[in-house]
Image (cartoon, rainbow, N blue to C red):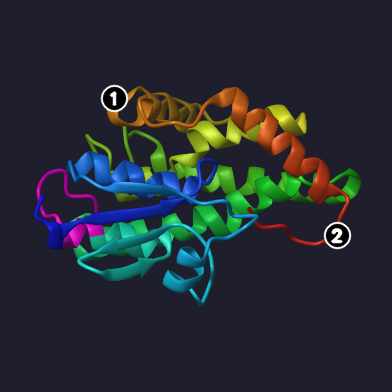
């Protein structure tokens, strides 16, 4: 790859937002330099590249900076047009994919993470919201191997955290959201997703994840009530 095409990704090993960008780059066959960030002691490089949100992931391509994982996914798909195409080509299907990607974060991920990091009534309330959101996703994936059709697409990448992060949170939080009997289609999709070679070979160590989120949940559960973002 020519020097002007150098791609750099700033990420954090336990972040599903960072990992989805890595999955997209690897699916497209794009070479990139990965820079691990300490999100609790942010580097001057991260603060310089993303002064607005000061968060990972951040993609740098041709000395241009792109932040926010969903924006980065679309940039990757539009810049490297080789197969697989991530976003649907039909405008309506593309709009639906964007809608469900946002739904996954705003309704499911935030509720599931809040359930992990809270106790008592707050935990029960968050669990109820997470399960209600999972019901909607179950209806969307029914009858399909992947959200993207026969292969992994934008929405699969966006919701890929459900297959790996969510079971870790369930274990750490002694809770169940993705019940295989209640959500068989989503459970089947999660297995298909994790069995894809690119995904399977690009996951953070599970036990390291368990220990990390155990510490995070202990710390965050001691804070005043309210929505806690990952």
Residue closest to the eye, 64 or 218: 64
Is 84 covered by the magenta stretch?
Answer: yes
At numbered mark 2, what does the secondary structure look like: helix, strand or loop?
loop
Q: Quadrant for residue 94, please give it.
A: bottom left
Residue shown at 39% from the left, 46% from the top: 20
Residue 113 showing in the rendered view: yes
Measured in 3D between alpha carbons, the distance from the residue under mark 2 to the one under mark 1, in whole angstroms, is 40 Å
| Number of other residues with Cα within 10 Å of mark 1, as a class: few under 14, some 14 to 19, many 20 or more | few
Q: Specify whether 63 is left or right of 81.
A: right
Q: Secondary structure at mark 1?
A: helix
Q: Identify the main secondary structure in magenta.
A: loop
Question: How many numbered circles are shown?
Answer: 2
**Left or right of 89 in this view: 36:** right
Rendered location of residue 63, percent (x, y): 25, 69
Q: Nearer the viewer, residue 60 or 126?
A: 60
Q: Is residue 42 above or below residue 1?
A: below
- Disc number placed over residue 225 in the picture, else none: 2
Q: Is residue 200 magenta?
A: no
Query: Is residue 216 depicted above or below 110 in this figure?
Result: above
| Pointer 2 or 1: first along the chain | 1
Left or right relative to 172: residue 150? left
Confirm whether residue 176 shows in the render. Answer: no
Q: Which residue is mark 1?
A: 197
Bounds of the magenta segment? 76-87
Q: Residue 226: horizontal and vertical position, in percent?
A: 80, 62
């Amino acid at each position: 790859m020519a020097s002007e095409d150098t791609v750099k990704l700033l990420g954090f090993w336990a972040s599903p937002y960072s990992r989805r960008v890595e999955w997209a780059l690897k699916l497209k066959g794009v070479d990139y330099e990965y820079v691990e960030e300490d999100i609790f002691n942010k580097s001057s490089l991260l603060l310089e590249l993303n002064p607005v949100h000061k968060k990972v992931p951040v993609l740098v391509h041709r000395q241009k900076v792109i932040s926010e994982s969903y924006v980065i996914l679309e940039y990757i798909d539009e810049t490297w047009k080789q197969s697989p195409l991530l976003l649907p080509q039909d405008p309506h299907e593309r709009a639906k994919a964007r809608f469900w990607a946002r739904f996954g974060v705003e309704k499911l991920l935030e509720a599931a993470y809040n359930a992990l990091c809270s106790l008592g009534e707050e935990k029960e309330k968050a669990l109820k919201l997470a399960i209600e959101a999972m019901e909607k996703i179950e209806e969307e994936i029914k009858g399909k191997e992947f959200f993207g059709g026969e292969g992994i697409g934008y929405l699969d990448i966006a919701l890929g955290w459900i297959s790996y992060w969510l079971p870790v949170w369930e274990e750490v939080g002694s809770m169940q959201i993705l019940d295989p009997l209640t959500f068989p289609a989503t459970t089947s999709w999660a297995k298909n997703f994790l069995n894809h070679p690119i995904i399977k070979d690009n996951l953070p160590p599970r036990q390291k994840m368990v220990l990390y989120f155990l510490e995070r949940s202990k710390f965050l559960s001691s804070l005043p009530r309210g929505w806690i973002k990952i």
